[in-house]
Amino acid sequence: SRSQGSSRNMPLDSWPSQGSDFAQKNERQKWEASLSSQLQSGTNLQTCSVNDSGSDKDGDADDSKTETSLDTRWSPMSKQSSSYSDTDTTEEDSESSDDMDFLTRQKKLQAEAKMALAVAKPMAKMQVEVEKQNGKKSPVADLLPHVPHVSECLMKRSLKPTDLRDMTTGQLQVIVNGLHSQIESLNEELVQLLLIRDELHTEQDATLADIEVLTRHQKRMAEKTPAK
């Protein structure tokens, strides 16, 4: 009862000190809880940063794997493209070799044509001279030496009836036989010349066909070549 009385008689100024102690204790507990919370959040942040760095490393590794897989995937395409480039190079080489063959053939044909034209004129003159030499003497002149004017007229194909008036039947028969033999000889020569003409026509047609092919090829090459 005395203690109760003493508590009842306790002065009022002693209560605030006790209240302040409680408040300080309360504040301390709050501060410790806040500090613990901050430490916990810091630990969580560190863990998150570690996890993020790990995820970044994993992401880099995945990226490198992806790049490697892409490289591996595209490597056949690169090989295929390189094979295509090799094929294009081979085609270009074949085209260039074809062009070289075309130019070589063109030069060869031009040289042959020039040579043929250069030789044709003197050969024709020589052939005419040979024919003149062979035609100067008629076979009738050997058979009728005493009538040279008849042989000359036969060569000139200007024989007149007055030239035959004083000739005998035997002499006239000789002239007829000579003319027949000359006709046969000329016919044989004509056949040979016709055969030569056919051969020349065939060669001419072949040459014209080659020229046409070369002209078309040259036009195609000119169209492909860009104008400078």
Image (cartoon, rainbow, N blue to C red):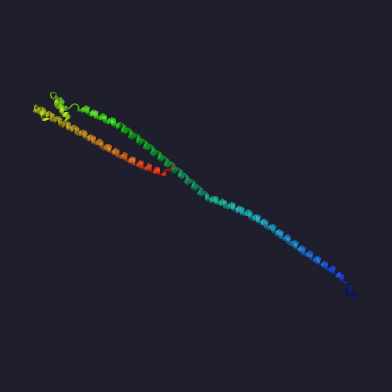
Residue 192 position, x and y percent, is 23, 34
In the image, is residue 19 above or below residue 53? below
Note whether 187 is above or below 76 in the view shown: above
Q: Specify the farthest residue to the top.
A: 146
Q: In the displayed image of the protein, which residue is found farthest to the right?
A: 2
Give the image location of residue 42, x and y in percent.
Answer: 71, 59
Q: In front: 79, or 9?
A: 9
Extreme-front residue of the structure:
228
Q: Is residue 8 above or below residue 227?
A: below
Give percent across and percent down for residue 223: 40, 44
159 with respect to 218 (left or right): left
Quadrant in which the N terminus is drawn: bottom right
Which quadrant does the C terminus fall into?
top left
Where residue 2 sits, quadrant-wise, is bottom right
Query: Is 30 situated left or right of 120 in this image?
Result: right
Number of marks in the rendered image? 0
- What residue appears at the point 71 percent right and 60 percent down from the top-left corner? 41
Q: Is residue 121 above or below residue 23?
A: above
Quarter-wise, where is residue 110 in the image?
top left
Horizontal arrangement in the rendering, residue 71 relative to residue 112 (left or right): right
Q: Position of residue 120 (x, y in %)?
A: 29, 32
Give the quadrant of residue 117.
top left
Q: Residue sitting at 15 percent across and 25 percent down?
A: 141
Q: Who's the residue at 29% across and 38% down the image?
A: 204
